[in-house]
Image (cartoon, helix red, strand yellow):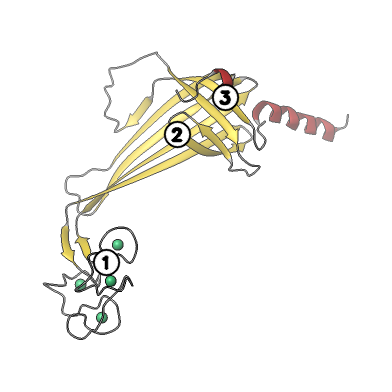
Amino acid sequence: MNKIGFVALGALAACVAACGLSAGDHATYRVGLTEADTSGDCNVDEDDSSTFRAGATFVLYRSSSAEDAVFLDTGSAVLTGTEGDDGYTFQGEVIDQESFGGQTIVDSDHDGLDDFGEDQMVDADEDGLEDSFDDDLVDTDGDGFDDRFDDDIVDADGDGEDDRIVTTGGDTLISTTTVTVTLTIEGDLAEGTAKSVTSSTCEGDCQGFGAQQCTRTQTFEGVEIDAAATDVSQ
Ligand SMILES: [Ca+2]
Ligand SMILES: [Ca+2]
Ligand SMILES: [Ca+2]
Ligand SMILES: [Ca+2]
């Protein structure tokens, strides 16, 4: 066999071990995850420890031939991923924003000035005519009701909130959680790492707030199982 043939066979052998999923394929693994190793601002008792592992059923599947069409269902979430030379990498991110404090005002033209206290020129429909005195009709959401007199809710952007009511100032707490799972398949064996990073930041004055970040890392290993004999919803 020539050198090219050996190289091709070597690549095929590596793919049988670590690649394997074609579009429409799936494989199910029962894995045991170690207790999380934590670092940063995790608010955990450093004196506690456990050698117990947490059991989980991972379902790996590919929905199409596209590179990013590999999915890992961990039982609590489904992550999208890619397949590389060393196995799979999956990732997901959740961003949660909470606003608090601030002042609620009527600001139909969104210039930051309270229409009834500070605004000398209110022109919500941007027609150059001052809405209170010079304008025959103001209907920014196009519902046929004059925003000033007849409209119970003005909602041009369709978010269910009245566009005239605006909160100024205040702070926004932003919590971001990123989960990354690496997975290597060798025959019927699976192993990898599950890592989550949760960070909290604040936009605004945020008096007394300090940014925090917590990293939790678990390793896991397991075996391929017969999905038909297993309730993967557990
Ligand atoms: Ca205004
Ligand atoms: Ca106007
Ligand atoms: Ca209207
Ligand atoms: Ca709205």
Q: In the drawing, does residue 155 fall left or right of residue 115?
A: right
Q: Is residue 66 above or below residue 38?
A: below
Q: Residue at x 32, y 70 (%)?
A: 141
* Marks 1,2: beta carbons within 8 A: no
Crowdedness near tag 2: few (<14), some (14–19) or many (≥20) residues, C-alpha within 10 Å: few
Secondary structure under badge 3?
strand
Q: Nearer the viewer, residue 104 or 170?
A: 104
Q: Is residue 151 above or below residue 73?
A: below
Label disc, if present, on residue 28 of the rendered structure? 3
Residue at the farthest right position: 1
**Which quadrant would residue 209 be assigned to in this image?**
top left
- Mark 1 — residue? 154
N-term mark: 1 or 2: 2
- Residue type of the residue flagged with mark 1: Val
Q: Position of residue 116 (x, y in %)?
A: 12, 72
Secondary structure under badge 2?
loop
The yes-or-no answer for disc 1 within 8 Å of ligand 3 is yes
- Mark 2 — residue? 77
Q: Position of residue 119 (x, y in %)?
A: 16, 75
N-term mark: 2 or 3: 3
Residue at the farthest left position: 117
Q: Quadrant of the C terminus?
A: top left
**Measured Cα–Cα span from mark 2 to mark 3:** 15 Å
The yes-or-no answer for disc 3 within 8 Å of ligand 4 is no
N-term mark: 1 or 3: 3
Label disc, if present, on residue 62 of the rendered structure? none
- Residue type of the residue flagged with mark 3: Thr
- Residue type of the residue flagged with mark 2: Ala
Nearest to the eye among marks 1 and 3: give it: 1
Splitting the image into four quadrants, where does ligand 1 fall? bottom left
Q: Position of residue 59 (x, y in %)?
A: 54, 28
